[in-house]
Amino acid sequence: MALPWRSQRSRRPGAAPQIALAIGAPYAARVATGCFISTGRTLEPAIERVRLAESLGYESVYTTHIAGRESLTVLTAFALSSTKIRLGTGVVPIYSRTPATMAQTAATIDELSGGRFTLGLGVSHRPIVEGWHGQSIDRPVREMREYVAIVRAILRGENPPGGEKWQSNFHLMGLEARPALPVYIAALSPAMLRLAGEIADGAMLWLCNPSYIREVVIPEIRAGRERAGKTLEGFDIVAAVPAALTEDVDQARSSLRRDLLPYFGLPFYRAMIERSGFGADIAAYDAAAGDAAAMQAAISDAFLADLAAIGDRSAVVDGVERYRQAGASSPCVGPVAHTDFEATLRAAIG
């Protein structure tokens, strides 16, 4: 069900009526379903998908930030083409902008959208941070803590704290403070998950299967919340769910394997995949180095069955529900290449 998020500035993520999950679920959370919509060859189809998602009752839409269209600019277009669906970055790297620029841009989009913006921040990876942006990842957890503290202070209209990585005395001028603007952190490792629980309004997950969410994500976020003297209530856990309504499951899995291949070579994801019980997939991937077909084949059917929601309508709905039962308060369906994402959006909402 779509919610008119923050038409009143005091409303926060999670302020909707709390609805308990099924017996055995880790905590009470709001029932929400979101989606990931990024642009392909042209922008207009993505805008139409946002309109479709809003009409179907999706609560939120996130867009990724890679090397195509710039995510925050895309979200501006989404804001101008919608009225009630929440809009967020999923996620933008902290090393691609100074905290002052990030806060200024986020405040502007939040104002433009009528208070519907969520700022999702991530560390990204060394090939991107160093190769694309000429920056360095030195102490990612500490640097994320420092970055968020500066962004938060600017959004509250306060003096930014001093930092080691970044320094700023920036203040918003001619634009009111946005203290209620939610900040989410992309997290995979236990340390980053604890940090998200401690200082953020939500955590954003990618390639985190339901077992990992249940066994690692929830306990670590809870530990971070306890460190801040808070409970899990109101904290949003956004989990990306690759989904496809299709009669050809094998073909959809093959497409997903091709898209997942780069992640099996990135250290942060490799560590998380091993922690989630698929170390054999990583070992097979390494053993197949240089053979693209064999590297794709190393990503097992078991891994994809656990991660994705692929098949008929029941398989899609059940796949999304597995994430919700594991503790994701906002499972967000994302597309699988060469499948009908519009049909998937219609199926997944239930």
Image (cartoon, rainbow, N blue to C red):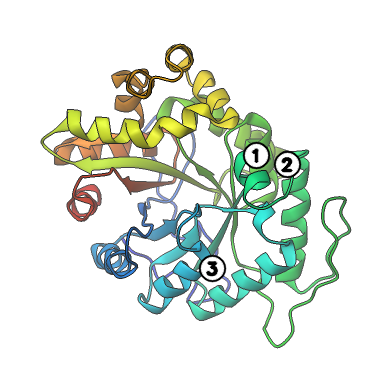
**Image quarter of the N terminus:** bottom left
Find out whether the residues at labels 2 and 1 contact each other: C-beta distance under 8 Å. Answer: yes
Q: Where does the image place residue 300, in percent across and percent down from the top left?
A: 33, 19
Task: Residue at the far bottom: name it.
Answer: 174
In the displayed structure, would residue 89 be above or below residue 331? below
**Which disc, if any, is residue 183?**
none
Judge the density around disc 2: few (<14), some (14-19), many (≥20) Cα neighbours within 10 Å. some
Return the residue nearer the eye: 83 or 141. 141
- Disc 3 is placed on an element classified as loop
Q: Which mark is residue 126?
A: 1
- Which badge, 1 or 3, comes first in the chain's sequence? 3
**What residue lies at 62% left-to-right and 71% top-to-bottom?**
105
x%, y% of residue 291?
38, 19
The image shows residue 48, relative to residue 192, as above or below, that is below
What residue would you read off at disc 3?
A: 11
Q: How crowded is mark 1: few (under 14 residues within 10 Å), some or many (20 or more)?
A: some
Mark 1 touching mark 3, by CB under 8 A? no
Answer with the quarter of the image where residue 329 lies.
top left
Q: Residue flagged by tag 3: what amino acid is it?
A: Arg
Which secondary structure lies at badge 2? Answer: loop
Q: Is residue 76 left or right of residue 322?
A: right
- Residue ID at (28%, 62%): 53
The disc labelled 2 sits on which kind of residue?
Ile
